[in-house]
Each structure stands twice: as C-alpha cells, then as structure tokens.
Image: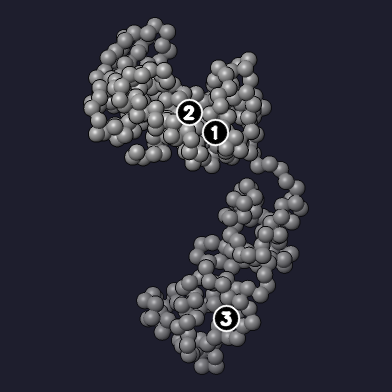
Amino acid sequence: MGNTKAVAECVGLWLAEGDQNSKSEITFTNNCIELIEHFINTTDLLFKNLQYNKRIYVYTSDGSKPETPFKNCQIKYYIHKRATKPYFIFRIASVGIVKKWKEIVKSLLNKNEFYPFILRGFFAGEGNIHEGKRSVRIIRISQKERKNFIDKFLNFLSLNYNFTSSNRMYNISNKRNWDIFAKYNLADLHPKKKEKFWRLYNSYKEEHYPINYLIKEVYAVLNNPTSTRELSKKFNRSFARIQDVLILLKKQGKIFNYRVGSTDYWTKNKSLIIISKLKKEYLLFLDKPKQTFEFARNFEVDWRSSFNRLKELEKLNLIEKDKTGKWIKTQTQKDILVI
C-alpha cells in the first residue's frame, strides 16, 4: 500500500471533504494547495500501476488562473462568484479505482493503529483552532451531526470532548487534551492550522504547583540517576524551574549531581558515583602508577585535556597522586555507574 500513514491521512481528508457517494470518481475538495498536492502525490504512488484519468478544477471569484504545482493533471478553470479564495477539486475517474479505494478506507477504519493518522487528515479538512478572550483555547471539528468514526478516534486517543448540535461542532479544550494533540501532531497536516495550534499550545503557562509540592515530588523519583531534562519532561515544568528545585535540594544536602559530557545527572543515592565512558577508560588504563603524558599519548589528546580528565577523577576521589607525582587509583566503597 506504499506509505500507509500517508494513505491514512488521505483517508481522513477524503472522509472530511470528499464525495463518498460516487461510484465512478474519487474527489477531494480544498482551498489548501499543500493538501491537494499531498492527496495527489499519495494516490499517484498508491495507484501507480493502474490506468486512470485525473483532473483538477480550479475555482476563483474573478476567473483568474493562479499558479499551481500540479503536474500530469488536466486543469480546468471556473468562476465561482462566492469564492473568497481559490479552491480546488481533484478528481480521479475510474470505477475500478473507486472500488479499490473504498476497500482501503474500510480496512484502515478497522485498524486502530491508523486512527491518529486518519484523524490528522480529517482535522486538516474539518478542524479549526479557536482563540478567544482571557486565554480561551478550543480545538474544534466541524460536523453537522455526530459521527461514530470520529467518536471512535477521539475515544481511542483518550480525548475528552463534547458535541454541540447548535453550532455543529466537536469541542475539545483543557491542556491535557492539547497535550494529546501535540503528542500525535494531529494539527500538523494543514500548514496554517499547524502554525496556530503550536503558537497557542506553546503559550500555555505552566500550571502552578506549590514549590514544596514540586520539591517533594522531584526528590521522590531520584532513587535512580535522572537528568534535568528528563525531570522537566516528566513533570511538565520548564528546564529552569526544575533546575531551581534541584539546586535547592542540593544545597540542603539531599541530592548529588554528576556531570557526564554536557548533561547533569541527579541522585539521592550517597553510595553512587556516576562517570562517563571516557573516564571509565581512564580508570582501566590506570593499571599501574602513571604520569599525565602517558594518558595523553594513549588517548591521542593534548596534555591539558588528559590533565583535566584526571583532575575530575581526583575530585570524585577515584584517583590521587602518589609520593612520586604519578597517578594511582584509590580504594572506594561506592558503586560506580557508567553512562
């Protein structure tokens, strides 16, 4: 079936804005050139071994002929006085292909692993992002009446929603639901809807947690070494906010941090030392007392670079200099974790 995810997106587009009753043509209508192009490219690959006619009808209010990227398509231009902007209808004429297409649609609608992709396509066609006063943000899907397959998609993704028949809309609000939309990139197929979604999603202010609550929760999960970025993602707090909590816990002597490369790892385990793979190699090379230049020569770096690594190991109390000025290992009761 080629790129099945792309096909599933086009199934969603077609369910939103295609003619589902025709037995002789596949049609898709939209005013977004990128969506039309996506539908054409996907069906070109899907039916590449079949013979069929494809056409594009371009409608404008003034009869103009806007430039399009469509190739290998017969293009016809028409006037539609009420068209506020150019829109396009793409058609594939083939009874056999229509039958095959509807079989594909039926198949994908019964495979829940493709629900996010179908919903992404459907939202590109019928979805919109509402921005109101006082930071009101609502994800909407226009529909005259509730559809079982839409309910099924939303329920599968654990999205909370309501349908209002008065304005013919599925309404989705609450940051938890926006998080799900962001996770599955459900608004990303339509370029303008994508831009608006991510602008509003990124404008969400962090939910306020009392500082003592966050300190308690962060401390509780630090049985195992964890990076600041991992904690930021886990608690959905900014990197800077988590960093403030970690520094406070460190000042209280409750946790410790070890830097590996450019990443700090934090733990409350006093019996643990965390080192990089390179530092482990330095320890393995130190099988007998050695001078700094020997490390530099072995690891093919300059003297200063090796000296810095050795000083870091010394700071961790894993090595020291003997009376002759050579580096030697120290005895430690702590566990060493290599990351």
- Residue 264 seen by the camera: yes
48 or 322: nearer the viewer: 48
- The residue at the far top in this view is 81
Numbered circle sitting on residue 153:
1
Left or right: residue 224 compared with residue 289: right
Q: What crowding class fits label 1: few (fewer than 14 Cα within 10 Å), some (14-19), or many (20 or more)?
A: some
Question: What's the amino acid at mark 3?
Answer: Leu
Q: Residue at x 25, y 24 (%)?
A: 52
Task: Write down the quadrant of residue 67 in the picture.
Answer: top left
In this picture the colour scheme is: one colour
Question: What's the amino acid at mark 1?
Answer: Phe
Disc 3 to disc 2, C-alpha distance: 59 Å
Quadrant in which the N terminus appears: top left
Label 1's element? Answer: helix
Front position among marks 3 and 1 = 1
Numbered circle sitting on residue 318:
3
Total marks in image:
3
Disc 1 to disc 2, C-alpha distance: 11 Å
Q: Residue at x 26, y 33 (%)?
A: 48
Label 3's element? Answer: loop
Question: Can you give x and y, in whole percent of width and height, for residue 161 in the image?
Answer: 63, 29
Front position among marks 1 and 2 = 1
309 or 203: nearer the viewer: 203
Question: What's the amino acid at mark 2?
Answer: Phe
Circles 1 and 2: CB distance less than 8 Å? yes
Left or right: residue 164 compared with residue 106: right
The earlier-in-sequence mark between 3 and 1 is: 1
